Image (tube, rainbow, N blue to C red):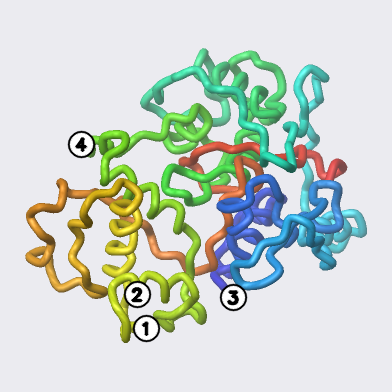
Amino acid sequence: MHDLNDWTNWSVPGIAYILERYNGFGYRLHHPHVKSPYLWSFTTIYAAGKYVGDGKWSDRAVSKQCGGMAALKRMIETGKAPIAMPDAPVDAGDVAITPSVSVEHGAAPPPAAEARPYPGHILKMDSNGPDVTAIQSRLRELGINPGAVDGDFGDSTEAGVKLFQARAVDDGGDPLEIDGIVGRKTWDALFGLMSPPAGVAPPPAGSLRARVLQVAAEELGVREVPLGSNRGPRVDEYLNAVGSGLLGEPWCMAFVYFCFAQAATALHVSNPAPRTAGVNGPGNWPSRCPARISFQPRRPRRTPRWSRQAWSSTSTPDRLPVTPVSSPTSSVAHW
């Protein structure tokens, strides 16, 4: 059941989230200018672009399967899916419902957000004040209509926050929770305030550590093929970077060595990482390695990773870097 029996948010955004999570976030993570055809094929939200093989992408291929949201819309229209639909916020006409998208260069970036620190408390239904006004204004900048920008957190603002959460990921690349509540993670996602955790200084720009983290981030989404095999096209490259005869062996430290090797080669410096595929204890980490690199622990995933789809398609209540892409409005009629 892939935990579907434990899922409780069967609203339209909740269904979109669980469907995309089931299929994986590959589109969101690696091809943000394309909405996942698993959801949006056979709708005006999707035109072209899909994976045509394991890890093989084509900008011109078009999915021939009906997307989950197109099927859901039809089921709602025919009464087969009795989902209560809230009225769509009134379009004031001065904000584009769908952000502009350049197919050649990917999704157009959202307007830069004014730096605004988290107020220190959650904002939700019936909250009011200047922080709510800031949220409403930012949602409008991102092409989401929260209703009137009046500082009153009402139904329309909650719907707008949920839509944003359904399209966003946090600073770790995980989807935001779709609950309509603006906590620290959703706030930081809205205003682009992704920063290292307290007490962990970011590595200096241009340093080996910074380049290692950049290389590691570019590997997000790599999976074993088949799962649990310690094999796969990219996993084999990690192991081969350490040495021959290691295919099928545990590869966690091989990945670290690979990232250091790539970064060191690019910067024309020596690689301080131990050349080993397995982790045998901190004593094997050479003292010459430049300072410790702190990695954020990630909770285990039970389902395939999505692709980080720009800021447009689903989420969890609290986290993200934003990258827009053409987006559905909150009204089912516009699917």
- Report the residue at 64% width, 13% height from top: 150
Question: How dense is the environment of label 2, judged by Cα within 10 Å: few (below 14), some, or many (20 and up)?
Answer: many
Residue 1's label in the rendered image is: 3
Label 3, secondary structure: give it.
loop
Tag 1 and tag 4, C-beta contact below 8 Å:
no
Mark drawn on residue 199: 4
Can residue 82 be seen here? The reply is: no
* Mark sitting on residue 146: none
Answer above or below: position of 98 versus 266: above
What separation in Å lies between label 1 and label 4 (alpha carbons)?
38 Å
Q: Is residue 294 left or right of residue 62?
A: left
Q: Earlier in the sequence, mark 3 or mark 2?
A: 3
- Check disc 2 and give the amino acid type: Leu
Q: Are marks 4 and 2 in contact (CB under 8 Å)?
A: no
x and y, in percent, of residue 28 in the image: 60, 51
The local crowd at label 3, few if under 14, some if 14 to 19, many if 20 or more residues have their Cα within 10 Å, is: few
Q: Amino acid at mark 3?
A: Met
Residue beneath label 2, please? 239
Q: Position of residue 53 (x, y in %)?
A: 66, 72
Q: State the CA–CA distance, disc 1 to disc 2.
A: 6 Å
